[in-house]
Image (cartoon, rainbow, N blue to C red):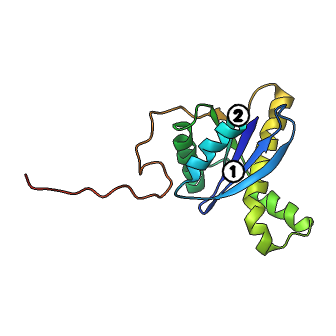
Amino acid sequence: MRLGVDVGTVRVGVAACDPAGTLATPVETLHRGRGDLDALVRMVDDRGAVEIVVGLPTTLAGRQGSAAQDAQAYAGSLAARVPVPVRLVDERLSTVAAARDLRASGVGSRKGRSVIDQAAAVIILQGALDAERRSGTAPGRVVARAAQTPPGTDGTRTPGPRKRHTND
């Protein structure tokens, strides 16, 4: 079983696939910030995930902007906390495709906001599963597992503890 993750500035969409790696389905939308990485770590544990696929937003010209840098930093923080590989895969237009698919199925924009990130995560994970099935090789690249990330530096916008200075 694998998890797919769509990293946004406000929300993180999560999808999962069946144990055979055939079909991706939506799981949850997490609020980005305090506790989102903890929730993903629990999902890996609870679901017995063997890999996490994180979408890397790349422009149509193949360039990586600030959203891609943010996704890479998030994937690095996640890789430092989970015992399974974290893989970055190209996710050009996954959110656009998810929004289009939701509109086509009659889901309005207000309700759609709560599930669009999950739908984008499904598209990211399903694309990775399909690409691997076609080529026999997992797409994207594995994020290097760094040392445990110190508190307050994991990209989750959680302030660290305040230091008290004393004059000794």
- Badge number at residue 152: none
Measured along the vertical axis of the image, is residue 76 above or below residue 20? below
Determine the residue positioned at 81% across, 33% down: 19
Q: Can see residue 138?
A: yes
**Relative to 79, 101 lies left or right:** right
Determine the residue positioned at 86% across, 30% down: 134
Query: Front-most of 46 and 15?
Result: 46
Q: Residues within 10 Å of mark 2 (few under 14, many from 20)?
A: some
Pointer 2 or 1: first along the chain: 2
Element type at mark 1: loop
Determine the residue positioned at 77% across, 38% down: 128
Where is mark 2, residue-wise? 48
Percent coordinates x, y for residue 125 in the rendering: 77, 43
The residue sitting at the right extreme is 105
Element type at mark 2: loop
Contact between labelled residues 1 and 2, with CB atoms less than 8 Å apart: no
**Relative to 150, 55 lies left or right:** right
Percent coordinates x, y for residue 124 in the rendering: 76, 46
Q: Quadrant of residue 96?
A: bottom right
Alpha carbon of mark 2 to alpha carbon of mark 1: how far? 36 Å
The residue sitting at the front extreme is 46
Percent coordinates x, y for residue 149 in the rendering: 44, 41
Q: Amino acid at mark 1?
A: Ala
Q: Amino acid at mark 2?
A: Gly
Percent coordinates x, y for residue 16 in the rendering: 77, 43
Q: Can see residue 94?
A: no
**Relative to 105, 93 lies left or right:** left
Comparing labels 2 and 1, the label whose residue is closer to the camera: 2
Where is mark 1, residue-wise? 61
The residue sitting at the left extreme is 168
**Relative to 31, 95 lies left or right:** right
Which quadrant would the N terminus be assigned to in this image? Answer: top right
